[in-house]
């Protein structure tokens, strides 16, 4: 459950449903990951249950091949090979659990398995929460005073309300960097109108102003007409999507996470494509727990072109299911855990509490 209702362009959320994935080896080592859900737990769980036989009895080190075999059989062979995005979100929990196993076997944190960190810490933006402009402005001021240098606000909730929100937040944070996310809320005409109205507020970037289905070309057209930089989010799920954004000059940065790409190595590949084009990768958070926070942090510190204002979502939870490490950013940043694997200890009591809450909700 969230500490408070989460307001954004697509509605209001009160909690995060996730699927906990555990894989046990014949040597008794347990790897832990999580998959985010869409549209509900049962649907996503059916994909994971389908995948299980492809992994049982196999080597944890063969994850890439096993995932490819699972997709070939479950989707490509059945004529639904265009479902890569959905498959990626479901299978990520297995991918993360396998990496957790490999790190525990090697007694090394994930970032060491990936070649080592190139950043001492990962920096996050202050994620403003609330409903009214007054609530959002008050929280934004607290975040700046806590040490966040980048402030991030959801818009796309109606033109007049959006303007009032941005005006109030800008006043509250002074000269701090301000980013906005419209979450696909606008058609082209409305997007151009809104970006023009928002230009006086010194916006560092606008994330995904257009629906993802219109593609990179539409984003490129919009970007050519505004002074506000554009960050592509839902338009991008894979290295191929990143390439298309770069090829068409559709965005100034890429917002992307491991749950969209389908796991660790596919995320690294996508980041490398963006690096070749001179674009930063801004970590995208979804409705997740500290498991994803730890995994993403471990991967991100190995990526040269990672952004300095990334998304973190674990602070929204009333109670996380990760016991350690402490995932409260200090001056807007977290260092990568030195614990083996993904670098966390699971809070089994919190898992059970969440499971009970889910059963009651059903």
Image (cartoon, rainbow, N blue to C red):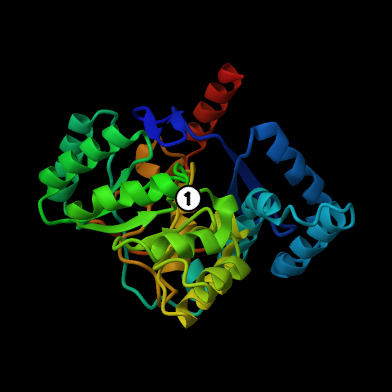
Residue at left offset 19%, top offset 46%: 143
Q: Quarter-wise, where is residue 265 in the image? A: bottom right
Q: In the rendering, at what x and y percent does residue 269 appear?
A: 57, 73
- Determine if residue 312 is in view: no
Residue positioned 69% across, 40% down in the render = 44
- Say left or right for 266 vs 232: right
Q: Is residue 292 above or below residue 227?
A: above
Establish if 12 lies above or below 180.
above
Q: Is residue 132 left or right of residue 236?
A: left
Instruction: Examine the image and state in which quarter residue 215 appears.
Output: bottom right
Q: Which part of the image, by quadrant, shows the C terminus?
A: top right
Name the residue tied to disc 1: 210
Residue 168, position as x, y percentages in the image: 16, 39
x and y percent of residue 355 in the render?
57, 28
The quadrant the N terminus occupies is top left
Can you tell which quarter of the image residue 206 is in? Answer: bottom left
**Residue 122: percent from left, percent from top:** 34, 64
The residue shown at (24%, 39%) is 163
Q: Is residue 134 above or below residue 200?
A: above
């Amino acid at each position: 459950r969230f500490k408070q209702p989460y307001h954004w362009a697509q509605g209001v959320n009160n909690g995060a449903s996730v699927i906990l994935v555990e894989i046990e080896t014949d040597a008794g080592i347990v790897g832990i990951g999580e998959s985010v859900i869409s549209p509900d737990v049962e649907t996503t769980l059916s994909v994971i249950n389908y995948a299980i036989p492809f992994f049982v009895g196999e080597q944890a080190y063969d994850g890439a091949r096993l995932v490819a075999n699972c997709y070939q059989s479950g989707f490509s062979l059945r004529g639904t090979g265009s479902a890569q995005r959905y498959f990626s979100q479901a299978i990520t929990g297995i991918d993360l659990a396998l990496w957790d196993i490999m790190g525990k076997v090697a007694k090394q944190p994930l970032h060491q398995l990936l070649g080592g960190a190139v950043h001492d810490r990962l920096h996050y933006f202050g994620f403003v929460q609330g409903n009214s402009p007054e609530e959002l402005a008050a929280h934004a001021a607290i975040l700046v005073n806590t040490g966040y240098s980048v402030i991030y606000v959801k818009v796309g909730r109606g033109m007049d309300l959006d303007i009032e929100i941005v005006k109030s937040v800008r006043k509250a944070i002074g000269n701090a960097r301000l980013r906005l996310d419209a979450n696909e809320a606008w058609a082209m005409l409305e997007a151009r109108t809104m970006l023009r109205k928002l230009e006086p507020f010194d916006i560092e970037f606008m994330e995904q102003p257009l629906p993802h289905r219109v593609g990179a070309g539409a984003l490129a057209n919009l970007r050519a007409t505004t002074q506000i930089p554009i960050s592509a989010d839902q338009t991008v799920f894979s290295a191929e999507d990143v390439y298309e954004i770069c090829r068409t000059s559709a965005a100034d940065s890429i917002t992307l996470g491991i749950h969209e790409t389908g796991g660790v190595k596919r995320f690294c590949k996508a980041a490398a494509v963006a690096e070749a084009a001179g674009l930063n990768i801004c970590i995208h958070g979804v409705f997740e727990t500290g498991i994803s926070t730890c995994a993403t942090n471990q991967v991100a510190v190995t990526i040269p072109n990672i952004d300095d204002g990334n998304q973190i979502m674990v602070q929204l939870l009333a109670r996380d299911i990760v016991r350690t490490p402490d995932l409260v950013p200090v001056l807007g940043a977290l260092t990568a855990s030195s614990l083996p694997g993904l670098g966390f200890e699971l809070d089994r009591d919190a898992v059970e509490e969440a499971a009970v809450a889910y059963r009651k909700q059903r």
